[in-house]
Structures are given as C-alpha cells and as structure tokens.
Amino acid sequence: MLVDEQIKNARHNFMLASEEFGFEFVSPFNLTDEIEVFGYISNYGSKNGVVVCLTAPPNYLTDNRVVEWCKENDCFCSFISIEPLIGEYRRSYFREMLRDWGQY
C-alpha cells in the first residue's frame, strides 16, 4: 500500500535525479481527466516518453487503464516499486533505471 509520505519522498528523489541527470520530470501527471499517474519523463523509454507509475509489495498492483493508454499513445510505461525510491536519494539506482529505459 502506498502512503502519502512515501510518495512525497519518492517524488523528491525523482526531482533530485532530474536535476542531476538533466531530464524533466512532471509529477503528478494526468493522462486523462480520470487517470493520474506518478509522473512522466519526455525523453526516456520511447519517442513519446515514459509514464512512471508506482507499485508496492506484496501485490505490486498495476493499472490496466494506464497500460492501455500507453499502448494507444505509443508511450513506454513503467510500474516501479516504491521501495528503492524512498529514504535517502540513491544516485546509482536512478542511473541504472535511466539506462534501462534508454534516452531518446
């Protein structure tokens, strides 16, 4: 289950990474009037960017509406665990994640 304080911490760490690695991170981000996601990065994952969604143990739930929106809009979608995003900022985690997504 995602807790507001954890989401704020994850958002803060993403903002630190965006400053360090030079990408724009928009958070929260609205896909539609009904669908809000954790964030969006325009120059990673695909030509149309990456939609970033948070998930948490034990179920690591995803939202099929987001997956379908991303398919329809040719946008990369990443559901990432909140666990490595909370606490102290970890540069190495973000560096590896951005490498995996690939810059466009």
Image (cartoon, rainbow, N blue to C red):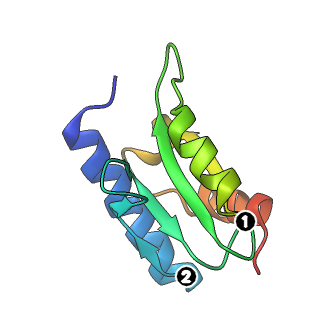
Q: Which corner quadrant holds the C terminus?
A: bottom right
Q: Quadrant of the N terminus?
A: top left
Task: Using the image, determine if residue 25 lies above or below residue 69.
Answer: below
* Left or right for 20, reference 78: left
Q: Toward which corner of the image does residue 48 lie, by quadrant? A: bottom right
Q: CA distance from mark 1 to mark 2?
A: 12 Å
Q: Residue furthest top?
A: 58
Secondary-structure class at tag 1: loop
The front one of 23 and 38 is 38
Name the residue rendered at 79%, 69% in the picture.
102
Asked if residue 97 lies left or right of residue 69, the reply is: right
Residue drawn at x 72%, y 63% is 74
Q: Amino acid at mark 1?
A: Gly
Residue 66: x, y in percent? Answer: 53, 44
Q: Position of residue 60 (x, y in %)?
A: 54, 23
Q: Nearer the viewer, mark 1 or mark 2?
A: 1
Mark 1 or mark 2: name the one nearer the start of the chain: 2
For label 1, count other residues whose C-alpha is less than 10 Å away and answer few (under 14), some (14-19) or many (20+): many
Label annotation for residue 45: 1
Q: Secondary structure at mark 2?
A: loop
Q: Which residue is mark 2?
A: 23
In the rendered image, the residue lying farthest to the bottom is: 22
Judged left or right of residue 61, residue 77 is right
Identity, as a three-letter code, of the amino acid under mark 2: Phe
Q: Which percent across, then down, holds residue 25?
A: 45, 73
Q: Which x, y percent locates residue 61?
A: 51, 24
Give the answer, above or below, for where 73 lies relative to 41: above
